Image: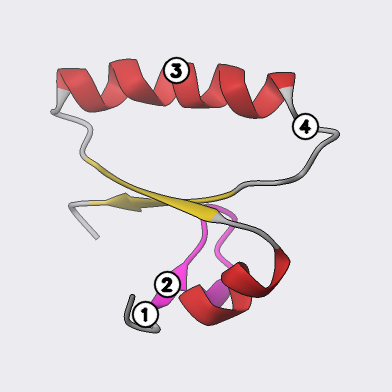
Amino acid sequence: MPNLSIRMMDGEKTTVDKLLQDSPILIDFWALWCAPCLKAMRHLDEFQNKYVDIRTLSRARINQTE
């Protein structure tokens, strides 16, 4: 995987390599106009909330319009 520079949802800038130092990552490419993307996002949020104490997965969401 290339060491991409990305901006997190909170505005913080980071790289794939930095995220991989802490845990596995899920990079989610999405768009507001994409109904399947929004449906999947709900399930990913539920998964993250269910396992919030485990902290074994970092998520990076990349909006296609950015």
Q: Residue at image x 64%, y 29%?
A: 48
Inspect the magenta stretch and tell me whether residue 9 lies in it: yes
As shown in the figure, which amino acid type bears the numbered disc 1? Leu
Residues at marks 3 and 1, CA–CA distance in whole angstroms: 25 Å
Q: Earlier in the sequence, mark 4 or mark 1?
A: 1
> Which residue lies at the image location 76% right of the left edge and 44% below the top edge?
55
Q: Which residue is mark 1?
A: 4
Where is mark 2, residue-wise? Answer: 6
Q: Quadrant of residue 32?
A: top left
Residue type beneath disc 4: Val
Residue at mark 2 to residue at mark 3: CA–CA distance: 22 Å
The secondary structure type at the circle numbered 3 is: helix
**Tag 3: amino acid:** Arg
Rendered location of residue 14, percent (x, y): 55, 77
Q: Which residue is mark 4?
A: 52
Answer above or below: position of 58 versus 41. below
Residue identifier under label 3:
42
The quadrant in which the C terminus is found is: bottom left
Image: 29 above or below 51: below
Q: Is residue 27 magenta?
A: no
Instruction: Determine the CA span between mark 1 and mark 2.
Output: 6 Å
Which span is picked out in magenta? 4-15
